[in-house]
Image: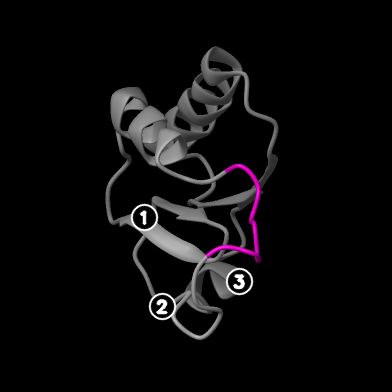
């Protein structure tokens, strides 16, 4: 699982998003790679407004920081491991 957080340098909301994400992961006992991107050029490549929460390449929240409750819900609804033996491989 990879979480990408987009933000702006010096933004307290972006810093809180990072802390809330780390705390949510700890509370749910989930391991994930967390990357926080502050570089404006790199943020622009995602074509969303910061702050943004991106999980495994999918934008889950943009232009606002989700609450820790929302982050936990997003993480809880995400399969921890992909099982390619289930379901149609073309529909995923």
Q: Give the left or right position of residue 33, taking residue 73 as reference.
A: right
Q: Which class describes the residues within 10 Å of circle 3: few (<14), some (14-19), or many (20+)?
A: few
Residue underneath mark 3? 42
Report x, y in % for residue 62. Answer: 32, 57
Residue shown at 44% from the left, 80% from the top: 91
Q: CA distance from mark 3 to mark 2?
A: 10 Å
Pair 2/1: label in front: 1
Report x, y in % for residue 10. Answer: 50, 39
Indicate the colouring scheme: one colour
Residue sitting at the far top: 27
Pair 3/1: label in front: 1
Q: CA distance from mark 3 to mark 1?
A: 18 Å
Report x, y in % for residue 48. Answer: 37, 70
Q: Secondary structure at mark 2?
A: loop
| Label whose residue precedes the other's in the sequence (2 or 1) | 2
Tag 3 and tag 1, C-beta contact below 8 Å: no
Report x, y in % for residue 17. Answer: 44, 34
Q: Give the left or right position of residue 3, taking residue 74 as reference.
A: right
Residue shown at 31% from the left, 38% from the top: 66
Residues shaded magenta:
80-86
Residue underneath mark 1? 60
Residue shown at 68% from the left, 38% from the top: 32
Q: Quadrant of residue 72?
A: top left
Residue underneath mark 2? 47
Residue shown at 34% from the left, 33% from the top: 73
Helix, strand or loop: magenta stretch = loop
Q: Quadrant of residue 86?
A: bottom right
């Amino acid at each position: 699982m990879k979480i990408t957080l987009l933000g702006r340098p010096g933004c307290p909301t972006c810093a809180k998003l990072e802390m809330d994400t780390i705390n949510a992961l700890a509370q749910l006992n989930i391991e994930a790679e967390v990357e926080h991107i502050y570089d404006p050029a790199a943020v622009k490549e995602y074509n969303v407004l910061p702050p943004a929460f991106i999980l495994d390449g999918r934008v889950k929240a943009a232009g606002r920081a989700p609450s820790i409750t929302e982050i936990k819900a997003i993480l809880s609804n995400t399969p921890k491991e992909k099982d390619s033996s289930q379901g149609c491989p073309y529909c995923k």
